[in-house]
Amino acid sequence: MSQPKQLMRRLSTRHIRFIALGSAIGTGLFLGSSSAIQAAGPAVLLAYMIAGAAVFLVMRALGEMAVHRPVAGSFSQYAYDYLGPMAGFITGWTYIFEMVIVPIADVTAIGGYMGYWFPGIPPWIWVLGTVLLIAAINLMSVRVFGELEFWFSLLKVVTILALIAVGLGLILFGIGSSDGKPVGVHNLWAYEGGFFAKGWDGLIMSLTMVMFAFGGIEVIGTSAGEAGDPQRAIPRAINSVPLRILVFYIGTIFVLMCIYPWPEIGNHADGTSAAAELHGSPFVSMFEYVGIKYAASLLNIVVITAAISAVNSDIFGAGRMMYGMAEKGHAPEIFGRLSKNGVPWVTVITLIVSLLVAIVLNALIPERAFALVAALGTFATVWVWVMILFAQMGMRRKLSREEIKALKFPVPGYPVVPMLAILFMLLTIGLMTLQEDTRLALCAGGIWLVAITVIYWGCCASRDKKVLAEKARQQDVADV
């Protein structure tokens, strides 16, 4: 059988929708929410609402471009076309950087989760096993991958909905905690400081971790090149996923804080942080608090599934981005090779190998690994979102009035709405200067951008200049 020349369009609306859910619901919810709650108190619910609205605007901007022109490489290609070759190069590689950093947090967490059942086995064995499993799934045909990711994500979604339902039942029927304290909505303002216990500044400071939680949802754009009917699948996926994620995050955290004392979330009895450990998971703590037996084991299964699903989607998105960049000379040509199943196998193997960094990172700085990786992931994620918004505005400037009217999935409120979203993203990056871990990650992110810019000028700038000159020449000939 001959090797396919391009990606196969075999993903349905159902697949794309759940791939995005799989990427966006992971450790950002099951571990990161502890840090966000500690920063903002109950007002963290507002932080998730505000951040979710901003992310939805980014997705609409991406959707407008993806429906107008579904291509492999997605927003890297759009940045290339509408902002210039260097913008496309930096955007694409920063997204790949993001999709390597974020899964490192997930696979690191899996080692700790498995230690709950098998404390005598070194965590790196579970990390290695997870990496090999992810490799096998991503090397299958895209339709098989889509089907597996659908079921991974569906299990996660159903479990979260069940968690919300059980929590609401405990609240409505007034079932108390194991120490006799009542549960209920009043717990959102019952503790010192009330609903805004940490003030508006606490709410604002929580945004960096909240934004990390939504990272990965832009994988919808990278799946456009393999969507069977992108003009139908992409709008449906984008219009449904943000709302569902808001329900999952706000619903679970609302229930959590109504049942479990929020000042104790993510802390040991002595007040020290336990956010990076299994017993510090707020959802495990919630069920233990109300005396539901075996809750820890059940939740452990869920968080492992969530982490595998998130890594699975992230590797898929980064692999397709690298494939798209190889097509235009912004990545080594070998990354454009496809298996007989139509999978860019070289990119998948490369990304899988990069995940092994999680073993080293977890060994060197186990206490700070998750916080640092999350902060660096936040920077890369927000930077990519800013470039998506700028690319959409660049596309609008290049379209004629007739072409703008013909857009099938236009961004509402253009250009005011995209500009507001850009300002919000820049605010989030600015907030990273105020805390040690996020400040360190911001410096690392800045070094990354400088390095990737230097690489572009050294490897691709002259080639891109020739390509653009040839396109201009051909256009002049066509006009004549």
Image (spheres, rainbow, N blue to C red):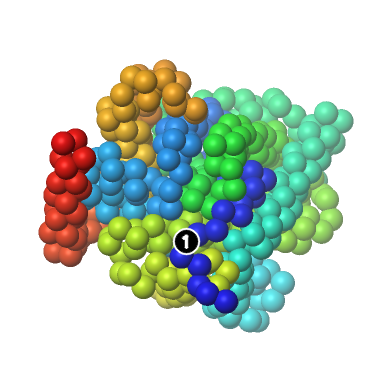
Residue beneath the point at 24% across and 40% down? 83
Q: Is residue 181 visible?
A: no
Judge left or right: residue 99 versus residue 395.
right
Q: Nearer the viewer, residue 336 or 433?
A: 336
Give the crowd class for mark 1: few <14, some 14-19, many >=20 residues within 10 Å. Answer: some
Residue beneath the point at 75% across and 29% down? 184
Q: Nearer the viewer, residue 180 or 44?
A: 44
Judge left or right: residue 423 versus residue 57.
left
Relative to residue 209, is residue 333 depicted above or below? below
Residue 232, by quadrant, is top right
> For the N terminus, which image quadrant?
bottom right
Q: Is residue 116 visible?
A: yes
Relative to residue 305, is residue 335 depicted above or below? below
Q: Which residue is mark 1?
A: 6
Amino acid type at circle 1 is Gln
Residue beneath the point at 61% across and 69% down? 140
Relative to residue 229, is residue 362 depicted above or below? below
Q: Nearer the viewer, residue 251 or 415?
A: 415
